[in-house]
Amino acid sequence: MSTSKEIRSTKYLNPYVGGVLLGLVLLSANFIAGRGLGASGAVKSVVATSIRAVNKEAVGTMPFMAEYAESHSGNPMKSWLVFEMLGVLVGGFISGALAGRLKLKVEHSPKITSRRRLIFALAGGILFGFGSQLGRGCTSGSALSGMAVLSLGGFITMMAIFGTAFALAFFFRKNWI
Amino acid sequence: MKPLRLLGLFIIPMGLIIAAVPQNKTNPFKLTAEELLAESNTRNQFVTADVVADMIIKKDPALRLIDVRSQEEFEKFSLPGAINIPAANLLSAEYSDILNQDIKMNVFYSNGTLASNEAWMITRQLGFENNYVLEGGLNYWFDAILNPQKPASTNPDEEFAKYDFRKSAGQALGGGGLTAQPASDNAAPSAKPAVKPVAKKKKAAGGC
Amino acid sequence: MGPLAPNELISENTNFLFAFLIGVAFGFVLESSGFSSSRKLAGIFYGYDAVVLKVFFTGAITCMLGLLFMGLFGWIDLDMIYVNPTYLTSAIIGGVVMGAGFIMGGFCPGTSFCGAAIGKIDAMVFVGGLFLGVYGFAFTYGWWEKLYLANYLGEPKISQSLGLSDGFFGLILILIALAMFAVAEWAEKKFPREAY
């Protein structure tokens, strides 16, 4: 299905350069806000807001949301991570636009269908959303930021994520290679 | 040069440096030597025996007396309600919550003022607030409070008021059956220092 | 003396503004490094693309060195930096679940937002999945609560638990990472896949 015309070679940053830049971004976050980056927390904020919008009391009574409501009195959307993720959307967009990578498409291996890719994307998202709450962070917040401050919990979560992914890679290889 | 080699060339030396240099634990609240000297020279860390006696009689909850002598001396005699933190153990972790706080007024005392003032200097240098020294220590306390000298008849009225206060305080504190009269307005013990709120170190909330 | 916000050197609103700007930089760097492509992200697990490994560890090490050096110069108070807490059970189990999600979905939350921003539909679907997953967790929280709170060890640092100084552990981490990069580059040559 894929033809060499469709394959657009696109220029990405050298990964080491990208890594150094990422490290500097993370460093500035730590210096300015005293905390690292994160992503799944923003999703949690939106979920909390939506629950609150539907039923104001529910947020207080649900134990998971309750401890969250206490630390974010007022608007759960007014959280550091929500602002950060809005920035991520903008930054990603700008970078994609500058590099000519803006395109509405489903990215998948030529050996599978779009539909199959989307099903797995959904399943993966659900698992990751669930796991990130249980693990108190995702790769950005727990693994990356945690490693940078030498947190033991962050390190353990990172090992678990990558270890599991490596272990299961064989079973999902058809999706990628 | 290959990017990996370039990266390695750069970060390995940095890693070596950071591994070799001892960690610098800077505390923004610590005082410099100049600052400590300036504060020490104001003598504001001293509270008089009268003020402390008054607080004890009034059962002022803000007062916390800290005996910095050894445990034996503490057990032989101590001021009412005092706790014992021997000077040698001043910096041990179990006492940091007592010494570094903003709820109570800690007053160090010892037999004289040498040990208690030392305790004050050490804790003040670390940036702790609300620690004071009992002026004159126990030696003065015994003389002035527990065995007050009757002033000569030519002395001003304040001296007499002070004497009356001390006499009744001494009897109450020394265990004589009298209920002590709190210091009357004439005696006017010097103003009690106010408890200063401590800027707590707040960590940012984080996580994902 | 940093960090700025916890030391109240900047207001909360300024902090949020910086959060946005930092996010812009974050998103830009991620996308420019190729993290908006699920195939590149999954590449490390099959050997053909080690971008995740390289960017991740280089980033963590850069920031770690930055923090340690800043602490050395007295520019930042390291005690005030947030260190992730360690809840042993949930850290491991959550990580395993996330690992499965990663290899299936090919994204993580941060990168999925990047991918969605440039129009990748699979990234958008992944984001949708994220929300479902979080809702699911919130509503079934009662089943997991004990697991979630088990084995709280405080906020230990890896260096602390190994009995090493931060700097020394940093050096070890650097050496391990460089070794991993060398292996990864070998693997990239050995298992190439066509770019697309």
Image (cartoon, helix red, strand yellow):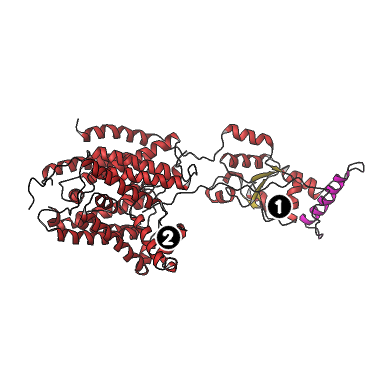
Q: Disc 1 designates what residue? A: B79
Q: Is residue B175 visible?
A: yes
- Picture coordinates of residue A38, whole percent (x, y): 34, 51
- Picture coordinates of residue B120, whole percent (x, y): 63, 41
Up-down: is B124 above or below C151?
A: above
What residue sits 14% from the left and 56% below the top? A175
Q: Are marks 1 and 2 in contact (CB under 8 Å)?
A: no
Q: Which residues are magenta?
A: B152-179
Q: Which kind of residue does numbered mark 1 sit on?
A: Leu
Secondary structure state at the residue bearing disc 2: helix
Q: Main secondary structure of the magenta part?
A: helix
Secondary structure state at the residue bearing disc 1: loop
- The chain letter under disc 1 is B
* Quarter containing the N terminus of chain B: top left
- Picture coordinates of residue B143, whole percent (x, y): 79, 45
Does the magenta-highlighted stretch encompass residue B176? yes
Q: Residues within 10 Å of mark 1 (few under 14, many from 20)?
A: some
Q: Which mark is residue A68?
A: 2
Depth check, front residue: B109 or A30 = A30
Depth check, front residue: A3 or B61 = A3
Residue A138, image quadrant: bottom left
- Picture coordinates of residue C76, whole percent (x, y): 44, 39
Q: Which mark is residue A47?
A: none
Residue A137, image quadrant: bottom left
What residue sits 49% from the left and 44% below the top? C7
Depth check, front residue: C185 or A77 = A77
